[in-house]
Image: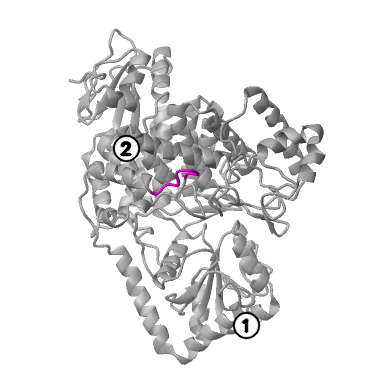
């Protein structure tokens, strides 16, 4: 009997639709079997739990009995959570773009009973408007074309399928050299808003990988424009409305040029990337603003995103009580009521006015003055924020999507481990380790396969290259900080799985999906960043790191092959390839820091503190006991302690420093600015 099957699913997004009168299927063989049996096209709707316009379309159309009756009569309807099945989303989003339409969610695609796309769009209103036809008119027209013009459907189907195949067969492979790093960084500076930071125009996304590229360019070249654009961007993000000044954490993006009005959803991956970049930049600037935002965002993570078993939840919704941003915004009267005589002081700092700055409400921000106030005023403001937090806690909270995603968790684990080392926070490390062990115990299969998604006690077998890349990166970060070989061994095993199931032997690089994914109509392969760094970029970094750790040149060769597989793309547009550029820099210019000493020894710890006091994004840190062997071709192999004390060696390529026992000298030896200005600081032999 036909019915809505989503109550059988674990995804919070799919469960949001379990009471729709639409006869939804989840993605799977049953849906396509029904489409073939009934000779109906498939309506595929893809979204995610925190998506505002997904909620709008659901309320307008999927909850409407008349629209649902039309959908049920004319189509087999499939609902997909893009976070649970990013592999499905990637295929049909690419198809939409190939149709010449802008991407976005909700994604509405029409497929043949075999799963091949032939037409689609994003949000369709219930009534015609926004320059879009009504959803019901679209449904009727697509059905009519499918039934009466099969030739047109077949032409579209075959053209899209061929184009999707061609996207994975890119002919843009080319060798590149390190000069492209400087060329790209200088080009990026010209595209940044000089006043507010970020790429010019609206909307504005954090685009952390781009600013990591700029920051690396500054460290490498000493170009003050690169430093300024990075700091301008981070200052505006940290003080703008995109940051939640009451509860901590960053929203997905700003809808305007000023970083004022956020799209209020909070994503785990944005916050992971911002914690990591802010931590690196803090090492150089010691900005109190960045330290505040890092500490507050980690506190938000602990308070709102850690699940009982240690994994990190995926998202917080943009909406509450059916309104976007209702949980986060304030009227002046509400501020006055909570803060009383202190309200005037608070309102001056946080842009609170009677008329508000957004739809009659106030989005708290400090964009008018990016500098922090005096210490006394900041302490006072912190106490007032606590009062507002207590008042806000009484509101209806936005929904939380409790899915645990392997790739997003890997990103946050790495960010927390790096921040824990920089700020000497064992509690942050513990959060990261707990999340890692959750993934390892709940989302790993015996054959070294990872599950992409876990929710409500169940893991889904589907996996993507990003899972292996980000979890391997997290494992190596944990290994670096602890010296526990089991973490390194996990990374080696996951990389082996990635090489076996995802590697494109013909063109180089990694496919997005494994070779045994049999429920997809195409395999995609790309290196462009989306909201997260591309899997090929992160795998390049992981491969390079394994080369530095093991001395196995096969890892370096595969890293460079991956870069070269997409090398031709740099000539067309390097902007979406920032993460691949960063990984290439690490592959070519990694700084190996080896400390010969016992981890518990105070001298060893002093040297480690010196290492983490410097911003060296491309470092590889190894601690070995005296007499412990290093890999055969490691440049420090055979070197010893000096004066029976913990001793550090700094190597770039096969050239190493003299033995260093003084923490200050080690800090100077790895400081990229001092190395650039005084190339002889680190003596070599």
Quarter of the rendering containing residue 7: bottom right
Residue 588 or 177: which is nearer the viewer? Answer: 177
Residue 154 or 678: which is nearer the viewer? Answer: 678
- Answer with left or right where residue 393 lies relative to residue 487: right
Residue 205: within the magenta? no
10 Å crowding of disc 2: few (<14), some (14-19), many (20+): many
Residue shown at the point (51%, 55%) measured from the top left? 202
Residue shown at the point (62%, 58%) measured from the top left? 12
Quarter of the rendering containing residue 343: top right
- Answer with left or right where residue 434 lies relative to residue 621: right
Q: Is residue 512 visible?
A: yes
Assign the C terminus to one quadrant of the image.
Answer: top left
Q: What element does badge 2 sit on? A: helix
Q: List x then y, in percent, for residue 144.
A: 52, 88
10 Å crowding of disc 1: few (<14), some (14-19), many (20+): some
Residue shown at the point (35%, 17%) measured from the top left? 597
* Labelled pair 2, 1 in contact (Cβ < 8 Å): no
Residue 145 vs 245, above or below: the answer is: below
Q: Point out the stretch of residues depicted in magenta.
A: 191-197
Q: List x then y, in percent, for residue 463.
A: 44, 56
Residue behind mark 1: 70
Q: List x then y, in percent, for residue 157.
A: 39, 79
Residue shown at the point (62%, 24%) measured from the top left? 374
Q: Label 2 to label 1, Cα distance in Å?
A: 55 Å
Front of the two marks 2 and 1? 1
Residue behind mark 2: 545
Magenta part, dominant SS: loop
Q: List x then y, in percent, for residue 354.
A: 75, 47
């Amino acid at each position: 009997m036909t019915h809505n099957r989503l109550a059988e699913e674990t995804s919070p997004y799919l469960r949001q639709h379990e009471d729709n009168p639409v006869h939804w299927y989840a993605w799977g063989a049953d849906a396509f079997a029904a489409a073939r049996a009934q000779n109906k096209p498939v309506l595929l709707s893809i979204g995610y739990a925190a998506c505002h316009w997904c909620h709008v379309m659901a309320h307008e159309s999927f909850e409407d009995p008349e629209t649902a009756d039309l959908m049920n009569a004319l189509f087999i309807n499939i609902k997909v959570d893009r976070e649970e099945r990013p592999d499905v989303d990637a295929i049909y989003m690419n198809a939409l773009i190939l149709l010449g339409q802008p991407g976005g969610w909700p994604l509405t695609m029409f497929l043949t009973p075999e799963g091949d796309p032939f037409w689609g769009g994003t949000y369709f209103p219930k009534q015609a408007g926004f320059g879009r036809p009504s959803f019901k008119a679209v449904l009727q027209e697509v059905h009519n074309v499918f039934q009466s013009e099969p030739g047109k459907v077949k032409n579209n189907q075959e053209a899209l399928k061929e184009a999707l195949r061609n996207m994975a067969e890119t002919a843009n492979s080319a060798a590149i050299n390190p000069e492209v790093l400087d060329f790209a960084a200088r080009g990026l500076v010209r595209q940044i808003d000089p006043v507010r930071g970020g790429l010019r125009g609206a909307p504005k996304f954090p685009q952390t990988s781009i600013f990591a590229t700029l920051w690396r360019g500054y460290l490498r070249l000493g170009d003050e424009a690169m430093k300024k654009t990075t700091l301008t961007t981070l200052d505006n993000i940290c003080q703008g409305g995109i940051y939640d000044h009451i509860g901590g954490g960053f929203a997905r993006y700003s809808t305007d040029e000023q970083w004022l009005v956020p799209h209020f959803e909070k994503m785990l991956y944005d916050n992971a990337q911002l914690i990591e970049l802010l931590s690196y930049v803090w090492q150089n600037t010691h900005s109190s603003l960045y330290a505040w935002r890092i500490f507050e965002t980690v506190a938000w993570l602990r308070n709102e995103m850690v699940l009982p078993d240690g994994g990190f939840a995926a998202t917080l919704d943009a909406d509450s009580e059916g309104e976007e941003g209702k949980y986060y915004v304030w009227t002046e009267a509400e501020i006055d009521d909570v803060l009383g005589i202190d309200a005037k002081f608070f309102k001056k700092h946080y842009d609170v006015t009677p008329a508000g700055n957004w739809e009659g409400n106030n989005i708290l921000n400090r964009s008018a003055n990016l500098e922090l106030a005096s210490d006394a005023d900041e302490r006072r403001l912190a106490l007032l924020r606590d009062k507002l937090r207590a008042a806000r806690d009484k509101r209806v909270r936005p929904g939380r999507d409790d899915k645990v995603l392997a790739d997003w968790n890997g990103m946050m684990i790495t960010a927390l481990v790096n921040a824990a080392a920089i700020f000497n926070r064992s509690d942050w490390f513990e959060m990261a380790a707990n999340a890692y062990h959750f993934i390892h115990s709940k989302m790993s299969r015996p054959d070294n396969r990872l599950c992409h998604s876990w929710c409500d006690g169940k893991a889904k077998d589907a996996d993507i290259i990003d899972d292996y890349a980000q979890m391997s990166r997290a494992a190596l970060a944990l290994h670096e900080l602890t010296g526990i070989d089991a973490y390194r061994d996990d990374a080696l095993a996951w990389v082996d799985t990635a090489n076996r199931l995802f590697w494109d032997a013909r063109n180089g690089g990694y496919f997005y999906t494994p070779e045994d994914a049999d429920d997809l109509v195409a395999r995609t392969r790309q290196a462009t960043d989306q909201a997260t760094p591309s899997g090929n970029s992160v795998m390049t970094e992981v491969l390079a790191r394994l080369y530095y750790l093991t001395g196995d040149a096969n890892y370096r060769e595969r890293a460079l092959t991956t870069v070269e597989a997409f090398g031709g793309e740099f000539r067309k547009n390097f902007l979406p390839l920032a993460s691949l550029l960063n990984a290439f820099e690490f592959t070519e210019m990694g700084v190996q820091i080896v400390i010969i000493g016992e981890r518990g020894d105070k001298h060893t710890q002093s040297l480690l503190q010196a290492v983490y006091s410097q911003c060296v994004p491309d470092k590889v840190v190894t601690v070995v006991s005296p007499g412990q062997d290093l890999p055969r071709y490691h440049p420090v192999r055979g070197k010893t302690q000096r004066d029976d004390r913990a001793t550090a060696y700094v190597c770039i390529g096969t050239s190493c420093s003299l033995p260093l026992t003084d923490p200050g000298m080690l800090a100077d030896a790895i400081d990229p600015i001092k190395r650039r200005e005084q190339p002889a600081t680190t003596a070599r032999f």
